Amino acid sequence: MRIAMFGAPGTGKGTQAEKLVGTFSVPQISTGDLLRAAVAEGSELGRKAKAAMDAGELVADEVVIEMIRERLAQPDAQDGFILDGFPRSIKQAESLDVMLERLEQPLEQVIHLEVEDEEIVQRLLSRGRDDDSEEVIRNRLQVFSNQTQPLINYYEDQGKLVSVDGTGDMQAIYDRIVKALDR
Ligand code: B4P
């Protein structure tokens, strides 16, 4: 299984990717988690990423693409993966396509999780991570609409897009995703 999940912040990408890992036994590769780990370590990459993350901006494409290139080369990613929160821009999507073509392992499907903005704001305010202030959340929503939403057409053109309603019970959302993947 080689899939990617994208959606606005707080649509539940991480939550659902974690559940999928339990069923399909492939690693979850979350750029958000990798970046937070780099920030916690205080590495050079972490220092570069922190300001963008705190402001709700995307971390530079070059930084994130290199991080994914290294992660996909690890042994546990050779038989499949669930990309969570990557790609988030057309440039990231194009680089990923090139990377996976070279490995002769193209993405199979791309899940787009959909949730209304106001519900997202409520979810993230109650999560309360450092970058979950209302101002930063609203900026992340704007960034999503400007930079990530174009992926909808990009993957639709490739015939890989699966849009899933991300509202309601977490198990019900999970069942919708699995059903969509079956097709
Ligand atoms: P991420 O870590 O990807 O953060 P996210 O979008 O907020 O999380 P997600 O959608 O996974 O939501 P979750 O399941 O946790 O990114 C953080 C930052 O890193 C970005 O802003 C950016 O700066 C940087 N970054 C990451 N990837 C990048 C990239 N590719 N390029 C550049 N920069 C990048 O769910 C959120 C909350 O909702 C949780 O509390 C959860 O319990 C709750 N929830 C989930 N499902 C629910 C449901 N059905 N009902 C009610 N609540 C639910």
Image: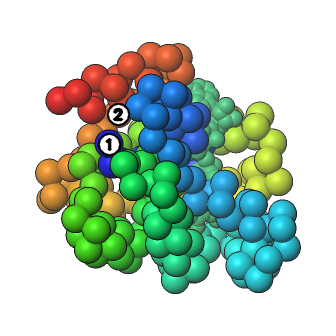
The residue at 66%/54% (across/down) is 33
Quadrant for residue 113, please give it. top left
Q: Nearer the viewer, residue 173 or 47?
A: 47
Q: Nearer the viewer, residue 3 or 153?
A: 3
The residue at 57%/53% (across/down) is 30
Task: Tell whether circle 1 marks a residue whose Cβ is less than 8 angstroms from ligand 1.
Answer: no
Please give the residue where the numbered disc 1 appears in the rendered image.
1
Q: CA distance from mark 1 to mark 2?
A: 18 Å
Label 1 neighbour load within 10 Å: few <14, some 14-19, many 20+? some
Task: Tell whether circle 2 marks a residue whose Cβ is less than 8 angstroms from ligand 1.
Answer: no
Task: Name the quarter where the N terminus is drawn.
Answer: top left
Of helix, strand and loop, which one carries label 1?
loop
How many numbered marks have been drawn onto this rendered protein structure? Answer: 2
Give the side of residue 13 with respect to residue 150, left or right: right
- Relative to 36, say whether 17 is above or below: above
Instruction: Tell me where residue 148 appears, x and y as whole percent.
Output: 42, 62
Please give the residue where the numbered disc 2 appears in the rendered image.
164
- Relative to 87, say whether 161 is above or below: above
Quadrant for residue 128, please give it. top right
Q: Nearer the viewer, mark 1 or mark 2?
A: 1
Query: Can see residue 118?
Result: no
The residue at 23%/70% (across/down) is 101
